[in-house]
Amino acid sequence: MKIDVNQKNGVAYVQEKSTIISNVQSALELMAIIRYEYDCNAIMIHKEAIIEDFFDLSSRLAGEIVQKYVNYGMKLAIIGDFSAYTSKALKDYIYECNKGKDIFFVANEEEAISRIINSF
């Protein structure tokens, strides 16, 4: 797994596009690696690195992972094109997350960095 840290703003960028987060445990393990090995409190990750079940809200995976990240004070920006998802519930979830200060669904790396930096 390739992880770059932007020294200027302390954001860890997970550049992997194969599945890294497949369940709550793998999400917690990634958070621990970023926090303790890279000394960062924010992660940027591509949506392709997250199992597709995350985007099916009925699986409850998104809610469980987001709750853990918020509770542990880890910012998360998920980079990708979310227009293919037709679920109104998911669109509402993305909208609500983007209004907050912890979890962001963004189109590109620049927007991810901007959202994270402006949330501190």
Image (tube, rainbow, N blue to C red):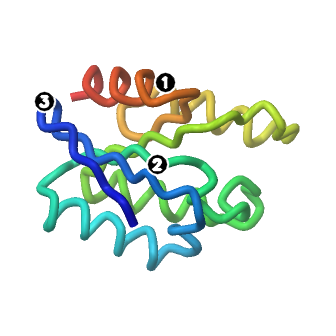
| Mark 3 / mark 1, whichever is N-terminal | 3
Q: Residue at x 49, y 24 (%)?
A: 99
Q: Which residue is mark 3?
A: 8
Q: Is residue 51 left or right of residue 38?
A: right
Where on the picture, by quarter, is residue 112? top left
The residue type indicated by label 3 comes to Lys
Mark 3 or 1: the one toward you: 3
Secondary structure of the residue carrying numbered label 1: helix
Residues at marks 2 and 3 touching, judged by CB atoms closer than 8 Å: no
Using the numbered discs, state the Cα–Cα distance from disc 3 to disc 1 in whole angstroms: 25 Å
Residue 105, quarter of the rendered image: top right
- Quadrant of image for the C terminus: top left
Please give left or right for residue 59 compared with residue 101 in the image: right
Which residue corresponds to mark 2? 45
Q: Which residue is mark 1?
A: 99
Mark toward the viewer: 1 or 2 = 2
Which element type, helix, strand or loop, lies under badge 2? Answer: strand
Instruction: Measure the alpha-carbon separation of dots 2 and 3.
Output: 18 Å
Callout 1: few (<14), some (14-19), or many (20+) C-alpha neighbours within 10 Å?
Answer: few
Q: Residues under labels 1 and 2: Cα distance? A: 19 Å
- Frontmost residue, 97 versus 46: 46
Q: Residue at x 34, y 48 (%)?
A: 43
Q: Is residue 115 above or below residue 86?
A: above
Residue 71, given in percent of the width and then of the height, sits at: 31, 57
Q: How many marks?
A: 3
Residue 35 location (% of width, % of height): 19, 60
